[in-house]
Image (cartoon, helix red, strand yellow):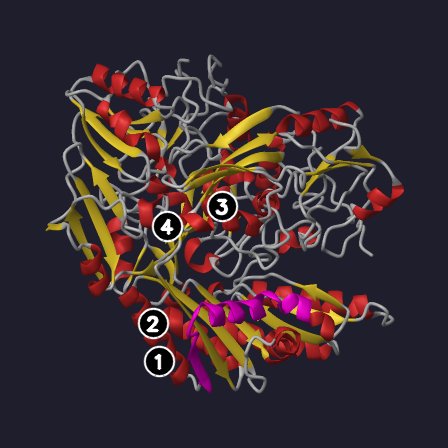
């Protein structure tokens, strides 16, 4: 919360940083110094392919999840940047994958969560069935909370049949029906179609088949811009030559990377100028881990945080409510 | 608020004392705002007089979520019914909460778009109410319920302040307050403007009617379709009693001698649709289907759907009252749970009819009765509770799309531990520390740690 002091803690209590595979270790700020790192169990708890649901320990890697689901011709399109990422880390960071346009954001894949709160209670939210509105939506609250309201133990995810065919193409796909991804790097649009083979080929008519998507930009300083989809082209045009980027058309996510920490701040300012914002994924100036703008609804969010972590033990200083956020 | 926009007339208070559920409450005042500022003013006036408030759309909710408890001000949003903005390219619409669900799809139909969640009450229910309950519908099988289609909500919070939760950008900074708000049944504030995602109309749609000699065969087909790797756009089931009632009512072309019918819809591109129609036909025939028919044209498709969506109206031909549950069970447990549902109804000498979203395991067992029969409510409640128990025992949940409201509030401990409920209560309190937004809904008494557990004071009739 803006300008608020860090909560006072009993001197003998150490803060906690939930840890997965460290593939998202700097997203939303670095974990606090001297924190006790707490992991979660790995492995499949239950998988009933005919229900299209799977329950896994939060420490399960995406690679393992995907392998188990693939054996039954299914998948869960969390699509983290690294296959070594854990399910818990992917949910906590809330970073959706490249096929979000078709498959939806991470938060729409989560049916039930079990996490330990800051005051040591094991809490279940949501339910194990594919459809459920019983009680408040703790699964969606957890997604993107960056380990600040609880340490995830277990999650139940929605799966779906794997498409029999998938192919990337280069070319303008604005008029095609429900592509799975549309990427734009300033020179070329790359689009993914999934479905039965004949449909995929027809969808790709007039486009050029390519081996895969462009590599996401790499660099010591990385971030993810979030703007309304209609603002993507204007936003990326304003980024400048020292920022490498790849945009998800139709979604509004722009992946940016640079070798210069101050350029990352400039990318963030561009996002603000287009009515959006930027989440830092890695690097950036060490003394600035915030949003660079006032967080909307900060007081309400602080009350939500306090509801689950009254003593401020979980990832203090890390976003969503990092204490160094500057307006 | 303008003249005539607030009332405490007994007739009006009586009208707003209940929704489409069975509980009856009591409002102390009712108002009809026409803007977000009006809503904020109404909340502030209520608070100044120490009164809670309850948001209400068309009152089609079945769980008593809009039933006024503790003499609140009922804030009716039906006069806020404008579609404010349509962005066809971004596939987003901003609407006021009183816009009717079907009116939104009609407003964007000429653009080749629609609003995906389609509750059976879609001709009457409002988008605001849909947000409150996180409403579903047959076509939520492939596209998800309301929460997956709401991008942003402008709300009046319990303290009368206004806030935007979520946004048009794909991820909003901080916690997903939008996700918390959708489905909170009016206990976290009142939506005054809603940004919804619109969905492209599919190039191809195939609607199939399959008939079976037994409920078990139909249910096995549902599981078989999912097992075959097909995720239809919709997969609905109706048993013999409801099928006959629907035929008598609207003549949808369902076979009268079937013990169960499945309505399956697949959509998308030409070859995928054809492949899925084949797969569903194969599974249905393998389970002994007596009829597999694909609607020949849009008119036949519309008629098949008219039957399904008229089901609740058709029940009036059997008995004047019905009581409906909304539990979800794992799809693999459908056959066992349906058998139990019929056994329970028989044991209580009640008629049960099943018409439901089979594809996602969302049961809607309807107990039909005449409330003038002495002692009938006791039997209906007893059977309803046993049915819910059977669903929970099978690994299910209390509600798939109707919400908790009052109806399932006191059953929440069957699904959630004291710590789970305490966490939910704390989340609710973060939004509404004084408990003035739709009080005594969703969470049972005693949800907060240290709160005295007392027998619930119901308003049951």
Dot in front, 4 or 3: 3
Residue where numbered disc 4 is placed: A57
Residue where numbered disc 1 is placed: B282
Q: CA distance from mark 2 to mark 4?
A: 27 Å
Q: Which residues are magenta?
A: B289-314
Residue drawn at x 22%, y 25% is A237
Secondary structure category for the residue under label 2 = loop
Secondary structure category for the residue under label 3 = helix
Residue A261, horizontal then vertical, whole percent: 21, 17
Q: Quadrant of the N terminus of chain B?
A: top right
Q: CA distance from mark 4 to mark 3?
A: 25 Å
Q: Residues within 10 Å of mark 2 (few under 14, many from 20)?
A: some
Q: CA distance from mark 4 to mark 1?
A: 37 Å
Residue A157, horizontal then vertical, whole percent: 39, 53
Q: Chain of mark 1?
A: B
Residue A65, visible in the rendered structure: yes
- Mark 4 touches mark 1? (CB < 8 Å): no
């Amino acid at each position: 919360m803006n300008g608020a002091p860090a909560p006072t803690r009993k001197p003998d209590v150490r803060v906690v940083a939930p840890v997965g595979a460290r593939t998202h270790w700097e997203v939303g700020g670095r974990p606090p110094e001297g924190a006790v790192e707490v992991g979660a169990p790995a492995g499949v708890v239950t998988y009933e392919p005919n229900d299209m649901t799977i329950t896994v320990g939060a420490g399960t890697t995406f690679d393992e999840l995907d392998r188990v689901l693939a054996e039954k011709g299914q998948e869960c399109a969390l699509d983290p940047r690294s296959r070594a990422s854990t399910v818990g880390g992917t949910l906590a960071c809330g970073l959706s994958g490249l096929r979000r346009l078709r498959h939806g954001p991470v938060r729409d894949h989560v049916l039930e969560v079990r996490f330990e709160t800051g005051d040591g209670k094991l809490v279940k939210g949501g339910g194990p069935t594919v459809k459920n509105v019983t009680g408040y939506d703790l699964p969606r609250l957890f997604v993107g909370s960056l380990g600040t309201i609880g340490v995830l133990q277990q999650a139940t995810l929605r799966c779906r049949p794997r498409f029999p065919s998938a192919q990337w193409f280069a070319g303008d796909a604005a008029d095609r029906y429900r592509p799975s991804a549309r990427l734009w790097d300033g020179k070329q649009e790359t689009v993914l179609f999934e479905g039965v083979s004949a449909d995929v080929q027809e969808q790709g008519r007039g486009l050029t088949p390519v081996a895969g998507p462009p590599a996401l930009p790499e660099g010591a300083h990385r971030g993810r811009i979030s703007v309304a989809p209609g603002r993507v082209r204007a936003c990326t045009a304003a980024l400048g030559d020292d920022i490498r980027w790849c945009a998800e058309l139709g979604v509004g996510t722009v992946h940016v990377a640079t070798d210069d920490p101050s350029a990352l701040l400039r990318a963030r300012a561009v996002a603000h100028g287009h009515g959006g914002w930027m989440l830092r994924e890695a690097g950036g100036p060490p003394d600035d881990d915030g949003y660079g703008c006032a967080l909307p609804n900060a007081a309400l969010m602080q009350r939500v945080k306090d509801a689950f972590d009254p003593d401020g033990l979980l990832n203090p200083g890390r976003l969503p409510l990092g204490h160094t956020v500057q307006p | 608020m303008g003249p005539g926009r607030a009332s405490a007339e007994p007739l009006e208070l009586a009208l707003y004392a209940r929704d489409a559920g069975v509980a009856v409450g009591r409002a102390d005042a009712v108002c009809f705002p026409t803007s977000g500022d009006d809503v904020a003013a109404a909340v502030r006036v209520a608070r100044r007089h120490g009164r809670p408030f309850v948001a209400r759309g068309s009152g089609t909710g079945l769980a008593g979520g809009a039933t006024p408890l503790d003499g609140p001000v009922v804030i009716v949003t039906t006069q806020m019914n404008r579609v404010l903005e349509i962005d066809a390219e971004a596939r987003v619409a901003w609407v006021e909460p009183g816009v009717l669900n079907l009116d939104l799809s009609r407003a964007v139909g000429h653009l080749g778009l629609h609003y995906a969640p389609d509750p059976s009450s879609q001709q009457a229910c409002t988008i605001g109410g849909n947000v409150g309950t996180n409403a579903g519908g047959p076509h939520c099988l492939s596209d998800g319920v309301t929460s997956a289609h709401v991008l942003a909500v402008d709300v009046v919070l319990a303290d009368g302040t206004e806030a935007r939760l979520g946004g048009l950008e794909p991820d909003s900074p901080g916690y997903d307050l939008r996700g918390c708000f959708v489905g909170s049944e009016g206990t976290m504030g009142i939506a005054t403007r809603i940004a919804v995602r619109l969905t492209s109309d599919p190039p191809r749609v195939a609607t199939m009617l399959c008939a079976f000699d037994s409920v078990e065969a139909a249910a096995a087909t549902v599981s078989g379709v999912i097992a075959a790797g097909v995720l239809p756009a919709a997969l609905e089931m109706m048993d013999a009693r409801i099928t006959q009632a629907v035929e008598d009512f609207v003549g949808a072309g369902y076979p009268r001698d079937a013990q169960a019918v499945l309505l399956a819809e697949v959509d998308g591109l030409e070859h995928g649709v054809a492949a899925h129609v084949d797969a569903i036909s194969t599974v249905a025939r393998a389970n002994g289907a007596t009829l597999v028919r694909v609607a020949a044209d849009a008119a036949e498709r519309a008629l098949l759907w008219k039957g399904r969506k008229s089901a609740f109206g058709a029940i009036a031909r059997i008995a004047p009252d019905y009581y409906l549950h909304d539990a979800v069970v794992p799809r693999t447990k459908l056959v066992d749970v349906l058998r139990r549902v019929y056994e329970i109804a028989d044991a209580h000498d009640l008629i049960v009819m099943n018409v439901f979203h089979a594809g996602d395991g969302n049961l809607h067992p309807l107990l039909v009765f005449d409330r003038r029969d002495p002692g009938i409510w006791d039997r209906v409640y007893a059977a309803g509770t046993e049915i819910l128990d059977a669903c929970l025992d099978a690994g299910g949940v209390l509600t798939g799309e109707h919400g908790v409201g009052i109806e399932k509030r006191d059953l929440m401990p069957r699904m959630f531990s004291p710590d789970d409920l305490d966490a939910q209560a704390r989340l609710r309190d973060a939004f509404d520390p004084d408990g003035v937004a739709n009080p005594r809904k969703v969470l049972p008494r005693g949800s907060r740690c240290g709160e005295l557990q007392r027998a619930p004071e119901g308003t049951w009739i």
